[in-house]
Amino acid sequence: MQLHVANHPLIDHKMTKLRDERTESPLFRELVAELVNLLTYEATRDLRVEPVEVTTPVRTAVGSHVAEPMPLAVPIIRAGLGMLDGFLKLMPYCEVGFVGIRRNEQTFEPETYAKRLPDDLADRQCFALDPMLATGGSLAATVQFLLDAGATEVTAICLVAAPEGVRLMEERFPGGNVRVHVAALDEGLNEHGYIVPGLGDAGDRLYGIAD
């Protein structure tokens, strides 16, 4: 697993606003979309392309086009849905799958309750979207689903990561076909499994508390 931590003043500025407990849901959603847009730019640096010829007003030119099969975006429900719009602004031609995973608050282990993915992901580049890489269980399970279906590369985009989650991803995926791009690497997890300083429950801050 390869970890890439963004180091950019614009991302730091937006992350500070995102962390602030006074930031209400409408602005929080807007900031998430902007941050994902910036992270996607870097996370797609190795996107496969193929040459294509176009005609400009002056002459023909050879450019590039995203290669088939098209990439697959996979938000982890529910908080990952808040990242999808920001991702699709740069990658509107992506197909989208969904994985629903909740964390058992007693054991901190992931529990899968929904999955909608193509049966065959052979030769596909996939992008998993999850705001928080905390214990790492949910993201690791999603990445494994994608690899088991034949995906050749999986890139995860997260807003905040804890060292514990990073270590789990490194242990589960020692090869170079899994990458994780994060806006910030935080101190660690508290006794409740939440990232410190973190930004709270991303799902609740995006959509409100839904019991």
Image: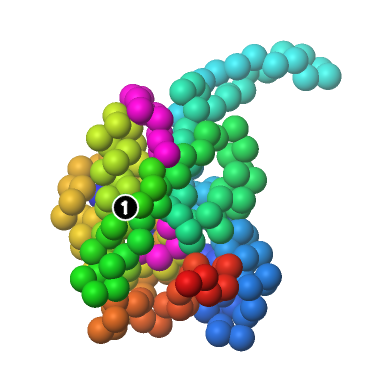
Q: Which of the pair 98/70 is nearer the observer? A: 98
Q: Position of residue 135 (x, y in %)?
A: 27, 67
Q: Circle 1 is placed at which residue position?
A: 112
What sort of colour scheme is used for the picture?
Answer: rainbow
Q: Which of the pair 170/53 is nearer the observer? A: 170
Residue at position x 27%, y 60% in the image: 110
Q: Per the image, is 132 magenta?
A: yes
Q: Which of the pair 101/134 is nearer the observer? A: 101
User: Which quarter of the picture shows residue 33?
Assistant: bottom right
User: Which quarter of the picture shows residue 28?
Assistant: bottom right
In the displayed structure, 163 sits above or below 155; it is below
In the displayed structure, 142 sits above or below 62; it is below
Q: Position of residue 119 (x, y in %)?
A: 35, 28
Residue at position x 83%, y 19% in the image: 57
Q: Is residue 90 visible?
A: yes
Residue at position x 53%, y 54% in the image: 81
Please indicate whether residue 85 sits to the left or right of residue 131 in the image: right
Extreme front residue here?
A: 211
Q: Position of residue 91 (x, y in %)?
A: 58, 39
Q: Which of the pair 4/167 is nearer the observer? A: 167
In the displayed structure, 154 sits above or below 194; it is above
Residue at position x 62%, y 80% in the image: 23
Residue density around tag 1, few if under 14, some if 14–19, many if 20 or more, within 10 Å: few
Give the secondary structure at mark 1. Answer: strand
* Picture mark count: 1
In the displayed structure, 183 sits above or below 13; it is above
What residue range appears in magenta?
116-133
Which amino acid is tagged 1? Thr
Q: Is residue 10 visible?
A: no
Q: Position of residue 99 (x, y in %)?
A: 40, 47
Q: Per the image, is 147 magenta?
A: no
Extreme right residue here?
A: 57
